[in-house]
Image (tube, grey):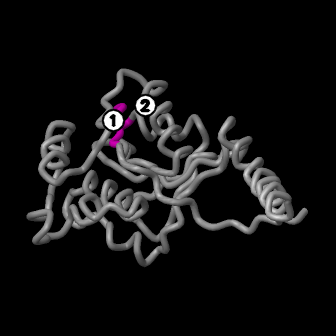
Amino acid sequence: MPLRITFIAFALVIAHCLAPSFSLAQGLHAAYMELPAEYRAWFKNPDGSCVQCSNGMVGMHINRPEWTFLLWDTDEYGKAIRGGSWPGRVADYARARGMKIFNITGDSYEETRAWMLWAAQTNRFCAIGAGRSHFQTLYGYVPGDPKPWKVCNNNSTSTVDEYTEEDFRRLHMASGPWVVVPDEPAPAPPPRLTLWWQ
């Protein structure tokens, strides 16, 4: 009998601890990468490889080396992928390297915005068209913030830029509605202190 009571008490404690996370899943919540600046610097754009730089940063966040090492020659994944890219080229090298992607070329901001929100809310993040003929990394989304969209530009990886909804829409549409989202498991979220006893 005492073992059963202990199990029930343990189950109630676990249920209480998990309740806040279940409620977060129902609505939008703050989400952002936590890559140190010195790691982001590995993905600084050396030669017009902005799509690969952006995808590489996403790869580091989701812990997928086939994404992370796009810019470098490796025995396991092949030659470095350098230079400008387009949806067909990304699909080809993703297939060759075993990268699972959603390669979305939308017809409107609303279409790709939904994918970007999904990528942020599921802790995957994504590489996005951002600026004229340029790709950057969607680094965070914080609803309720006056500048909810957080973007890391691979031309200046030491900072994370913040955008209002309208400024972000203009930035994204300047390149055209194209995003590359991992069709891979999301990483575990960073640990957070939970006062489970309260």
Tag 2 and tag 1, C-beta contact below 8 Å? yes
Query: Dividing the picture into quarters, in which one does residue 9 lie?
Result: bottom right
Look at the image and tell me in which quarter the C terminus lies. bottom right
Q: Which mark is residue 178?
A: 1
| Three-letter amino acid code at the position of disc 1 | Trp
Measured as percent of width and height from the top left, residue 88 is found at 15, 37
**Residue at position x 45%, y 41% from top?**
171
Residue found at the very far bottom of the displayed protein: 38
Task: Judge left or right: residue 129 versus residue 123.
Answer: left
Does residue 115 lie above or below 18 as drawn? Answer: above
Task: Judge left or right: residue 186 versus residue 49.
Answer: right
- Residue range in magenta is 174-180
Task: Judge left or right: residue 83 versus residue 3.
Answer: left
Question: Which residue is label 2 attached to?
Answer: 112
SS at mark 2 in the image: helix
**Marked residue nearer the N-terminal end (2 or 1):** 2
